[in-house]
Amino acid sequence: MGKSTEAGPLKSVMVVFGALAFGWLAIELAFKPFLDKARSALDKSDPTRDPDDDEDGGTTQKSLSDEEAA
């Protein structure tokens, strides 16, 4: 019966790791579309570009009034 005292903590550790793995898998499946979009955006991003260093302050996008005037 000496081994039953050692099996208790080991069993608890295995249950915790199993629950963490199951939780991670559930989150991956539930948020798959969002995670795929975020991962593809990260792959396309340029890590050497700093948006804070832009001269124009990041206002290169046209406004609606600019498009109507053209």
Image: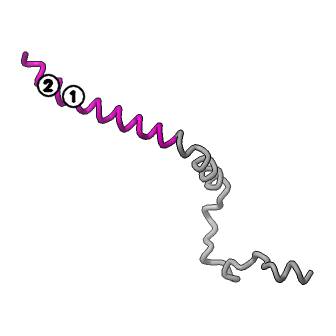
| Disc number for residue 10 | 1
Task: Please give left or right for residue 29 compared with residue 49 in the image.
Answer: left
Q: Nearer the viewer, residue 65 or 56?
A: 65
- Amino acid type, residue under disc 1 in the picture: Leu
Please tell me whether residue 66 is drawn above or below residue 22 in the rendered image: below
Q: Which residues are magenta?
A: 1-28
Estimate the x, y position of residue 4 in percent, counting from the top left.
12, 20
Secondary structure at numbered mark 2 = helix
Estimate the x, y position of residue 15 in percent, counting from the top left.
29, 31
Residue located 82% across and 83% down the image = 65
Residue 30 magenta-highlighted = no
Residue located 47% across and 38% down the image = 26
Q: What secondary structure do most residues of the magenta stretch adopt? A: helix
Most extreme residue toward the top, as rendered? 1
Residue 9 magenta-highlighted = yes
According to the image, label 2 marks what residue?
A: 6
Please tell me whether residue 37 is drawn above or below residue 51 in the rendered image: above
Q: Residues within 10 Å of mark 1 (few under 14, many from 20)?
A: few
Estimate the x, y position of residue 27 in percent, counting from the top left.
48, 43
**Location of residue 23 (image quadrant):** top left
Task: Please give left or right for residue 68 compared with residue 36 in the image.
Answer: right
**Location of residue 61 (image quadrant):** bottom right
Please tell me whether residue 19 is drawn above or below residue 60 in the rendered image: above
Most extreme residue toward the left, as rendered? 2
Contact? badges 1 and 2 (CB < 8 Å): yes
Distance from Cα at disc 1 to Cα at disc 2: 7 Å
